[in-house]
Image (cartoon, rainbow, N blue to C red):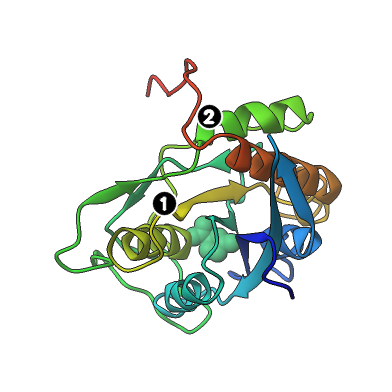
Amino acid sequence: MQHDLSTLLVTGFEPFGGDTVNPSELVAAALHGSVVEARGRQARVVAQRLPCAFGDARARLAAAVDEWRPVAVLALGLAAGRAGLTPERVAVNLADARIADNAGGQPADQPVVSQGPAAYFTTLPVKAMVAAMRAAGAPAELSLSAGSFVCNELFYGLMHHLATAGPAACRGGFMHLPLLPAQAAGPAGLRPSVALDLQVAAAAAALQAVLAHEHDIAAAGGSIA
Ligand code: PCA
């Protein structure tokens, strides 16, 4: 891999919770090596697969950030039940797991970083990302909570790393993805899903928005409750 272009680091998770696939690692892998262009800027996507394990995932991401020194990081994960692609606004300093992670870890009511701030806001232009994904024909919406499992821990760990130790000027954030149709075809009852091709196209559009918008667009949004 060349270092001539700037880098967009995109991560995905291995399957967890009894699933055999995770759309986040498939989307990240599909984008690996592609060149994103927007407003005269170019960056090459480097994808990294992460273990679904508290502590381990965020340590590996911090190491990848320090290795690649990307202009931005977009971490991806699955949120079964979401009806579209959902960039997250807030990472909270809380690990509270309803199920065990892939290493058997199941923290209850623990801080991600003791003495860390209660929360971090994303530094990605999430409203511009939502608009770009919708323009690409994909269902997308802002989300206010990444939960309290490994994805939130990764998101919080990423933002803490960028705020305290990582490369200056690197922006970071997290986006949850919906199930794939094949996952929703199981016996667990009807759940929303989005085809892999559309998830990949939407994530590519979101990355373009990241390059195009150093600051988020002014647009009405947010949620009433
Ligand atoms: N989703 C989980 C962890 C890994 C993933 O893809 C979560 O939302 O926390």
> Callout 2: few (<14), some (14-19), or many (20+) C-alpha neighbours within 10 Å?
many
Q: Quadrant of the C terminus?
A: top left
Q: Any mark on residue 198, and which?
A: none
* N-term-proximal mark, 1 vs 2: 2
Q: Residue furthest left?
A: 115
Residue occupying image coordinates x 79% and y 43%: 201
Q: In terms of depth relative to the viewer, which is nearer, 99 or 173?
A: 173
Q: Quadrant of the N terminus?
A: bottom right
Q: Which residue is mark 2?
A: 127
Residue 111, compared with residue 79, is above or below; it is below
Q: Is residue 5 left or right of residue 95?
A: right
Give x and y (percent) for residue 41. 67, 44
Residue 28, compared with residue 87, is above or below; it is below
Instruction: Say which of marks 1 and 2 sits in front.
Output: 2
Residue occupying image coordinates x 74% and y 48%: 36
Q: Residue furthest bottom?
A: 103
Residue occupying image coordinates x 39% and y 63%: 153
Q: Which residue is mark 1?
A: 147
Q: Secondary structure at mark 1?
A: loop
Q: In terms of depth relative to the viewer, which is nearer, 65 or 95?
A: 65
Give x and y (percent) for residue 20. 73, 71
